[in-house]
Amino acid sequence: MKITIIDDDEISTFVTNKVLLKHDSKKEVTTYLSPLDGLNNFKKMNHKDLLPDLILLDLNMPKLNGFEFLDELYKSNDIFKKIKICILTSSTNKSDYEKSENYNSIIAFITKPLSIDSFDKLSDKLSK
């Protein structure tokens, strides 16, 4: 499974990566600490085989928040709408959760930090 983490918080990214690899060491994990870097690299992917199976996306990031990242990504190519998205955020704002329901590709909204238990539940959603 290919997973991309987009989160500006290095400690959170480190913890998330450790949980993912502890869950299954065969995962291919790519990390972007800048949503702009992630967006630019995604725009270079022009074949579905290059795309990740899942993006773990933070919401509160400088220059481009998680929703803005998704909007820009989707504008660039419809192929990106097929990637499953999990919002992984420290936000407990109900309006963020409600806004996430407007995106068909968002399959989960998880409050940081990611745990093995929450990733198990997310894995169940991925298999559907």
Image (cartoon, rainbow, N blue to C red):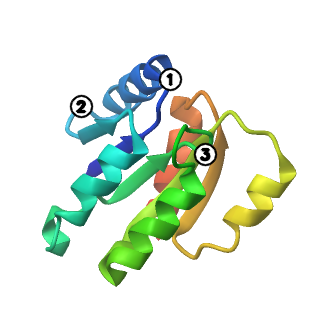
Tell me the amino acid under the disc marked 3.
Leu
In the visual, does 83 lie left or right of 25?
Answer: right
Up the image or down, 126 lies above or below 91; here it is below
Q: Are marks 1 and 2 in contact (CB under 8 Å)?
A: no
Say which quarter of the image contains residue 75. Answer: bottom left
Residue that badge 3 annotates: 59
Measuring from the top left, give residue 56's x and y in whole percent: 46, 47
Tell me which numbered mark, 3 or 1, is placed earlier along the sequence. 1
Measuring from the top left, give residue 51's x and y in whole percent: 23, 63
Residue that badge 1 annotates: 12
Which mark is in front, 3 or 2? 3
Q: Secondary structure at mark 1?
A: helix
Structural crowding at the residue carrying mark 1, measured as other residues with C-alpha within 10 Å and reported as few (<14), some (14–19) or many (≥20): some
Structural crowding at the residue carrying mark 2, measured as other residues with C-alpha within 10 Å and reported as few (<14), some (14–19) or many (≥20): few
In the visual, does 4 lie left or right of 118?
Answer: left
- Residue 59 shows up from this direction: yes
Tell me the amino acid under the disc marked 1.
Ser
- Spatial CA distance of label 3 from label 2 is 26 Å
Up the image or down, 47 lies above or below 6; here it is below
Up the image or down, 2 lies above or below 44; here it is above
Q: Secondary structure at mark 3?
A: loop
Structural crowding at the residue carrying mark 3, measured as other residues with C-alpha within 10 Å and reported as few (<14), some (14–19) or many (≥20): many
Residue that badge 2 annotates: 25
Tell me the amino acid under the disc marked 2.
Ser
